[in-house]
Amino acid sequence: MRFTFFLLLLAVTALSSVQAREWTDATGKYRIEAKLVVVHGDKVVLERPDGKIISIPVAKLSDEDQTFLKELAAKKAGPSSESDRAADTKASAAMSNSASALDMSPKQLATQTKILLQDACHRCHGEDGTSEGGFNFVVNLGKLAETIAEPGEDSLLIERIQADDDSVMPPGGEEPRLSPRDIQVIQEWIAAGSPAINDEPERPFVSNDQVVALIDQDLQQQPERSQRFMRYFTLTHLYNSGISEDELQTYRNAFAKLLNSLSWNSDLIIPEAIDPARTIFRLDMRTVHWTQTIWKSIEDANPYFLPPRSPEAKSCFERTETEMPFVRVDWFVFAASKPPLYHSVLNLPETDADLENMLRVNVQANINQEMAIRAAFNRSGVSQNNRLIEWHKSPYGSYWKSYDFASNTGRQNLFEYPLGPSHRRDSFQHDGGEIIFTLPNGLQGYLLTDEQGLRIDQGPTQIVSDPKQPDRTVTNGVSCMSCHYAGMIPKRDEVGPAVQANRSAFDDADDILALYREASEMDRIMDQDAKRFADALDDLGITTLSRSGESISAMSSRFIQDIDLEQVACEFGLQVEEFLERLQEASRVARIFSSLQISGGTIKRDVFKEMFADACVDLQLIDVHEVHRPNRSGSSVAAASNARSGSSPVAKAPMNSDGDRDSKMPSGRSPNRTAAPMKVGSKLSPIAKFSDLRWGVKSLAIHPNQNVVAAGRPDRKITLFNIDHQSILGELTGLDLLQAVTACAFTPDGNHLIAGGSTGHIVVYSVTEKGLLRPSGQFPGHNGEIHCIDISSSGRYALTGDAKKVARCWEIATGKELSMIGDFEGPVKAVHISADERTMLATDGATLVEADIRTGDPISQRPLNRSWASGQSAAFSPDGTWLAVADTYNIRVWNLNTFRELMPLIGSETLWSMRFAPDNQHLFAGGSGKVDVWEFQRNARLQRQSIHRGYVHSLAVSADGSHFAAVGSIGGSLEVFSRNE
């Protein structure tokens, strides 16, 4: 019997005595904020802000950190170090003597260890699905042996139960506690090899066909007219793999919480199990206000569907009117808690203004009427700089809006500029924010936005960060749920007290204090919010609230961990023996799964996801024609959408022998013809409408033949619409390199489509005669979302502008960068290449820069608006003679040959998009549900064309000026119009 005693160099007597600090590795590349727990031997143990304990070799720390530890150790040692060492020796000897008295077999040690952990730790680490620290398997000795109680390793379990500071487990003050003899039992259990015992009843294996039979049986018990609304969620594969009932309950808790966090119903929905083991749950989609379209988005994203073949499966498909009536709970919790599914399932709009309209919250009116309440502070848990939170009353409870900043200086210092937001010079200037709003059922919804109020998937790490994520990225949905595990985080305002203490320094003190009010008002609102949120969770059976135990984020993190042989087999619906037998006959995936055939072998989750469909075929579970593949990038346009419009049915072309749509790019009209200038009295007549676009459209381009519109989509798609036939010509899906397709443009000859994404990546696609898009090149030079594209008249060069305030000129054929224009104050809104391809123009709305196309050397620089944030859009005319820039509600237009400014075009609302007609005499401007057509030199508005719902962020005009296309932002339809003289 052998015991390992660690040399204690430094024991922190209380975590509160050593504050969190930044630790750096020896290379200087990696940094982490954490509290010092203890130093054992040659390792330092740290606790991150999310509660996770990590161990790092001291030798790998920076010199500064190693010096800090030595100084702290010396300070701790003091004159009593010798007596302390004597006490340690005495305690060690006592334990050694006691240890030698234990006489237990490995099985007895395992049994006693499980009893001890059940009594002392289970209440926080497994009971009723609790998952404190993401750790919900404290009585699963087999899993403990693989994680925190590995034989022969420094045991984190022992470190925590023996700690003499605030990291001790169970926490101080909690009973029952582990006695020295209890700890000795656990130590001996680990020394004996951490043997496991299995005292749970043996579970019968549930096959895929049995799951489908149970679902079909349940469906038959539902009213016939309701069956098409039933959907099912399964945990059977996890049940089959042997995970404990505690772990299964954590998944149930996460599923129940997420389901209700994606619901606009005022009633909480308790998922109803249809089997005794509670691994299959029925959902009536109507109870959470989900449509067939929302379910289709879930189907499209699911990579783990193995189509069943049984008669019961056919019955399920017919009754539910879908070929995927069930999905896995663990995948759903992971995928639907983050974009794009989080946005689409909850039906979140693309802007904060749209959300406020939907919730009937008038933010500006509340600020003006002093109905809003604010709190500002220097630092928060996620924001790196000072932060402002603002409360508004909503019909369902609260609407919270934060204003976040990239720095603390200038107009980003809330103590100097506490009022705003506005374009006034005495207003703060924020870089983004988070919105937290009460759902009708008492839970919360979340939206991240940029400085313009546009919805984003992730927050910039230089502004906000999530310590629970490996890359510290704040992701909408899951990061917010983790941070706000108990609802709103109580905060105390620091601006109001500062103003009250120094009123003479603020000539607008009364205006400030009208918003930054007494702390008691904010405390009362936060208490009400916290109670509403906690009551909702309590009704769902979730009674333990802690950040490290938040079930959705914990199970999302668990999902992406490596998976072992047993779980892989069960995810295919097979027992281990049958899986290995089938693997012997497999030809394509045997090498990928080879690591599973060694002891303790695992496979990466992303590898497993990528080859799941192919493996189903290779393991002879399904035939090739039965494969379901989620949306992902491909080499051809797959016309996969079943979108339908009430006014314009969508037709599909038949498939040819290669699986491609047997349709051709419509011949259209001559791409070189330019229509005559529009006249007063000219009408724009609707000629095509494409509805049910699900996640909407981010960018538009009309092919030079005038018969095809390309739509860049936020859900990683490009869709080609045939205008004449009012049909989908084709669709390219799963564009992971691009993510949201935020800008697109055809080359003048129509042979290529340039598409830029929210990632900053740009892909060049060849356009075939059949209307297929095939990747033919790329440009990876940007690192911010692509906002605008212009292509030279020869089709040789592209000029692209991004959200990171840079425009880059590059060669389309090679992807080689020629030059760039930088140092704008804001995102680049419009770009233009001159007809002779010698110069380029770019603007952020505040400044116009002209530069040499080959060198990037500036030729001229002119001021425009007072700020880049004064307007949302800008445009150059095709011949480069005119520049239009939005200025609040108006449009300013300059002649770039003389730099003479015309009389402004007066409007009454924000303009989100602009395009010049090819005649260089007319301007299209998109606002809220409308497009105005201006003859700008005469200051005459020729027409106002209504657009179906939402802000018009996307506009396109055909090369001959005969067609224009537009789409609204909130579930709007794509509409195409033609000139009618």
Image (tube, rainbow, N blue to C red):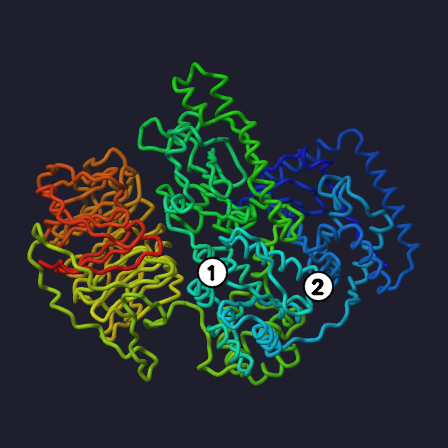
Q: Which residue is mark 2?
A: 244
User: Which disc is residue 138 wearing?
Assistant: none
- Residue 4 vs residue 641, the one in the foreground: 641
Of the two numbered discs 1 and 2 in the rendering, the one whose residue sits closer to the viewer: 1
Q: Which residue is mark 1?
A: 290
Q: Earlier in the sequence, mark 1 or mark 2?
A: 2
| Residue 595 seen anywhere in this rendered image of the structure | no
Q: Residue at x 25, y 54 (%)?
A: 947
Q: Quadrant of residue 211?
A: bottom right
Screen quadrant of the C terminus: bottom left
Left/right placement of residue 887 relative to residue 82 reads left
Crowding at label 2, few (<14), some or many (≥20) Cα neighbours within 10 Å?
Answer: some
Q: Amino acid at mark 2?
A: Ser
Q: Residue at x 39, y 51 (%)?
A: 349
- Residue 689 vs residue 494, the one in the foreground: 689
Numbered disc 2: secondary structure: loop
Where residue 636 appears, x then y in whole percent? 33, 72
Determine whether 393 is above or below 555 in the image: above
- Residue 425 vs residue 825, the one in the foreground: 425
* Alpha carbons under labels 1 and 2: distance apart: 32 Å
Where residue 863 appears, x then y in whole percent? 20, 35
